[in-house]
Image: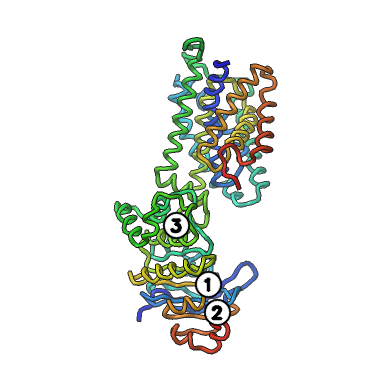
């Protein structure tokens, strides 16, 4: 088992307030790791800290065994990490193709056009609407476009903050199918998710956070049987 | 009457260019740049200098003053404006207002407050088109202004830096997460805004006399055009500029030029009451 990402004893917060109190997690290469827990438990803060958006006050973060603590997002994008926000974050007045071109902003090679076609082939729903403005897409399609955009840099790891937020159940299914497909193409995911039932079916390893600490961790098949977790989230 | 409207359209083209820089900076950085008029006047003085000392035609001198003001604008943004980009609008107004006063006084110190104008050899030429007489200088400035406006549009639509500028305007966080160097893009945007102001200044220097204190009216006019055309649409300043040009010329003919500015601001109040998002702006 190879860890693509490892965070050791992370302390982080905003201003005076400390949100994360010594959290350690690992994301195995080629797998989907999930972070679950109640609102305010620090899941999104952890994700933002892993991606350099929040600077940790203590602890270390490693990506492919290289320390990346406090590196800024641009460096992490170049290294093969990407981050998708919880809220919709497409460029609404630009077409799908323009959004994808911007996803390749850090690239200087000549294969961007080919890669746009490759990425669109992974997202057939977007391919049909490639010249539409992103603002005209449905919530689910916008979520797919966000995923497609980060795929333009061929990331090895995608950090996803609540991919199902604000989407209808049927759309959520197709988003998770898309995540599963990308995972089958070799992309590793760390996903924060409120829809616990859904994410435990998709992910292979999970962490339950509460008040900025890891309360429980394990294989998702085990977590689905944990009485404490079942009582709080799955009943 | 046709001649008045035509003259208004020709002037409006230059007005549109004048407002493009302010609209770009406003739309991307949410900074209402009060110093915009002073940048226009600085562009006029640089053109005057090139005309007086090197004998350069204002149209030839224009790219030089655009480059100079791009560099100046980039440095100003990175050292000063960037500190207030995401601050409350009051601070951005205060800082850019201070910058305007500083620039005006430095220009008055350097060039005195005597009114100046650039008069190239074709200044007083014109030609007749049926019953209409068109001053050549107005026609030249109009086409140059429209050409620069179209170039800006192509730059924003077709280049990766242009797309990055639009992306930063549309969603700052998403731009950052796509690897766009937002701070650098802000600097480039302000630099382009200053370069556009310089271009407008070069053209305005041929159309009317100017002093270091002409910046205030230019800022106000640019502001009216931005609001009139509507922010968030690349064609907004063009439409706003053309409309203002025509309204000013027609009102000057009927009411006299004394009321020119009063009519402009009357139009501003009217558009704010009837269509606050501007003629082409997005409705909230």
Chain letter for mark 3, please.
Answer: B
- Toward the viewer: A18 or B115? A18
Q: Residue at x 57, y 49 (%)?
A: B82
Q: Nearer the viewer, mark 2 or mark 1?
A: 2
Chain letter for mark 2, please.
Answer: A
Q: Quadrant of the N terminus of chain B?
A: top right
Disc 2 is placed on an element classified as strand
Q: Which residue is mark 3?
A: B178
Chain letter for mark 1, please.
Answer: A
Q: In terms of sequence position, does the residue under pointer 2 or pointer 1 come before the other? A: 1
- Toward the viewer: A53 or A115? A115
Examine the rendering and report whether any part of residue B184 can be seen: no
Q: Residue at x 52, y 72 (%)?
A: A46
Residues marked 2 and 3 touching at CB (< 8 Å): no
Disc 3 is placed on an element classified as loop
Query: Residue A209 — which label?
Result: 2
Q: Residue at x 39, y 59 (%)?
A: A125
Q: Which residue is mark 1?
A: A46
Instruction: Measure how far apart labels 3 and 1 are at the Cα level.
Output: 20 Å
Q: x, y percentage for residue B139?
A: 48, 20
B219 shown above or below A223: above
Instruction: Measure how far apart labels 2 and 3 are at the Cα level.
Output: 28 Å
Residues marked 2 and 1 touching at CB (< 8 Å): yes
């Amino acid at each position: 088992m190879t860890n693509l990402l490892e965070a050791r004893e992370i302390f982080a917060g905003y201003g005076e307030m400390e949100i994360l109190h010594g959290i350690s997690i690992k994301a195995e290469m080629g797998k989907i790791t999930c972070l679950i827990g109640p609102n305010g438990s620090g899941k999104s803060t952890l994700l933002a800290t892993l991606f350099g958006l929040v600077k940790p006050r203590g602890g270390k973060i490693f990506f492919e065994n290289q320390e990346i603590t406090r590196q800024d997002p641009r460096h992490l994008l170049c290294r093969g990490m990407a981050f998708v926000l919880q809220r919709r974050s497409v460029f609404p007045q630009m077409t799908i193709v323009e959004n994808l071109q911007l996803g390749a902003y850090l690239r200087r090679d000549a294969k961007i056009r080919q890669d746009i076609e490759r990425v669109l082939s992974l997202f057939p729903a977007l391919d049909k609407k490639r010249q539409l403005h992103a603002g005209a897409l449905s919530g689910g399609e916008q979520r797919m476009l966000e995923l497609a955009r980060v795929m333009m840099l061929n990331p090895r790891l995608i950090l996803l903050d609540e991919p199902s937020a604000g989407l209808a159940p049927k759309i959520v299914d197709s988003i998770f199918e898309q995540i599963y497909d990308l995972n089958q193409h070799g992309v590793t995911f760390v996903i924060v998710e409120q829809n616990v039932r859904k994410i435990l079916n998709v992910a292979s390893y999970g962490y339950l956070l509460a008040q900025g600490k890891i309360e429980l961790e394990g294989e998702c098949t085990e977590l689905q049987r944990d009485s404490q977790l079942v009582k709080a989230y799955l009943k | 009457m046709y001649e008045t409207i035509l003259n208004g359209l020709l002037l409006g083209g230059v007005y549109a260019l004048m407002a493009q820089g302010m609209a770009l900076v406003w739309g991307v950085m949410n900074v209402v740049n009060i110093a915009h008029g002073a940048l226009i006047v600085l562009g006029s003085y640089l053109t005057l200098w090139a005309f007086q000392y090197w004998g350069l035609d204002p149209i030839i001198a224009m790219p030089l003053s655009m480059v100079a003001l791009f560099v100046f604008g980039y440095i100003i943004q990175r050292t000063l404006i960037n500190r207030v980009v995401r601050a409350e609008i009051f601070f951005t107004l205060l800082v850019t207002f201070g910058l305007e006063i500083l620039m005006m006084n430095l220009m008055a110190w350097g060039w005195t407050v005597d009114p100046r104008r650039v008069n190239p050899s074709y200044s007083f030429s014109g030609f007749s088109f049926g019953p209409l007489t068109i001053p050549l200088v107005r026609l030249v400035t109009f086409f140059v202004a429209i050409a620069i406006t179209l170039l800006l549009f192509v730059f924003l639509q077709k280049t990766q830096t242009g797309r990055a500028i639009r992306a930063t305007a549309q969603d700052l966080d998403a731009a950052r997460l796509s690897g766009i160097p937002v701070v650098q893009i802000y600097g480039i945007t302000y630099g382009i805004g200053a370069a556009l102001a310089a271009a407008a200044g070069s053209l305005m220097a041929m159309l009317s006399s100017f002093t270091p204190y002409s910046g205030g009216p230019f800022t106000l006019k640019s502001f009216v055009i931005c609001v009139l055309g509507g922010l968030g649409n690349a064609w907004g300043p063009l439409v706003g500029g053309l409309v203002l040009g025509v309204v000013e010329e027609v009102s000057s003919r009927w009411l006299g030029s004394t009321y020119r500015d009063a009519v402009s601001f009357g139009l501003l109040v009217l558009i704010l009451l009837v269509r606050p998002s501007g003629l082409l702006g997005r409705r909230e």
